[in-house]
Amino acid sequence: MRIVFDIGGSILAPNNIDVEKIKAISNILKKIKDEGHEVAVVVGGGRTAREYIKAAKQFNADNSFCDAIGIEATRLNAMLIISALGEYAIKSIPKNFEEAELILKLNKIPVMGGTHPGHTTDAVSAMLAEYIKADLLVIATNVDGVYDKDPKKYKDAKKYNKLSFKELFEIALKASSEAGSSSVVDPLAAKIIERARIRTIIVKGEPENLLNAIIGKINGTVIE
């Protein structure tokens, strides 16, 4: 299979940089590649991005410039994954999907961050999956799937084990406009997943969950 992994920045650095977690995730990515799969990775900015953007706003930085700061933060996190992957990757971060596909054709793992202001790394991962015709998109985040509302705030939040492409988009759209509702995928990413009909699995960002998503032991939400 050709697989794109979307790894949230909060997974790599929830407070400080989690070196052991990065090692474990990278080892899983290596294992998946060694089993004959083609692997591509998109990494989020997480707390690093939020802290720098918050500081920049104190200097009245506009939203476009803050987006650029966020993109640089995602690339910092991508460099950590590249460092941990060693010879499985190359020491260059693709700035577009053409570069990512070229790295894939070199039998290496491309590791991307953000690309354009206004696009989250969820959207980037969906667009990359569409561009390279991936068989599967795995989104690793800080919750274990898609809920009808924020499970951290509401004990009665309902988790969805399976959703259609259209249902994911509707939930993401609702979450973007209503307080008290939560989706781990933004509307643009959900729309790309829907239009390209990319089979997607959303899991909590523990290393074993990345491997389990590939072998069918899914503890998350499947979109198909």
Image (spheres, rainbow, N blue to C red):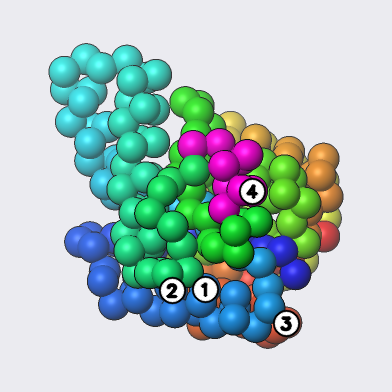
Residue 179 appears anywhere in the view: no
Span of residues in magenta: 95-103
Instruction: Calculate the distance from the C-alpha at mark 3 to the C-alpha at mark 2.
Output: 18 Å
**Residue pictured at 51% horizontal, 77% vertical:** 30
Q: Are marks 3 and 1 in contact (CB under 8 Å)?
A: no
* Of the two numbered discs 2 and 4 in the rendering, the one whose residue sits closer to the viewer: 4
Q: Residues within 10 Å of mark 4 (few under 14, many from 20)?
A: some
User: Could you tell me the amino acid type at mark 1?
Assistant: Leu
Residue named by callout 4: 101
**Residue pictured at 46% horizontal, 62% vertical:** 89
SS at badge 1: helix
Q: Are marks 3 and 4 in contact (CB under 8 Å)?
A: no
Q: Are marks 1 and 2 in contact (CB under 8 Å)?
A: yes
Residue 100 appears anywhere in the view: yes
Q: Which badge, 3 or 2, comes first in the chain's sequence?
A: 2
Residue named by callout 2: 25
Instruction: Calculate the distance from the C-alpha at mark 3 to the C-alpha at mark 1.
Output: 16 Å
Residue named by callout 1: 29
Instruction: Calculate the distance from the C-alpha at mark 2 to the C-alpha at mark 4.
Output: 22 Å
Rendering coords of residue 71 (x, y %) = 39, 36
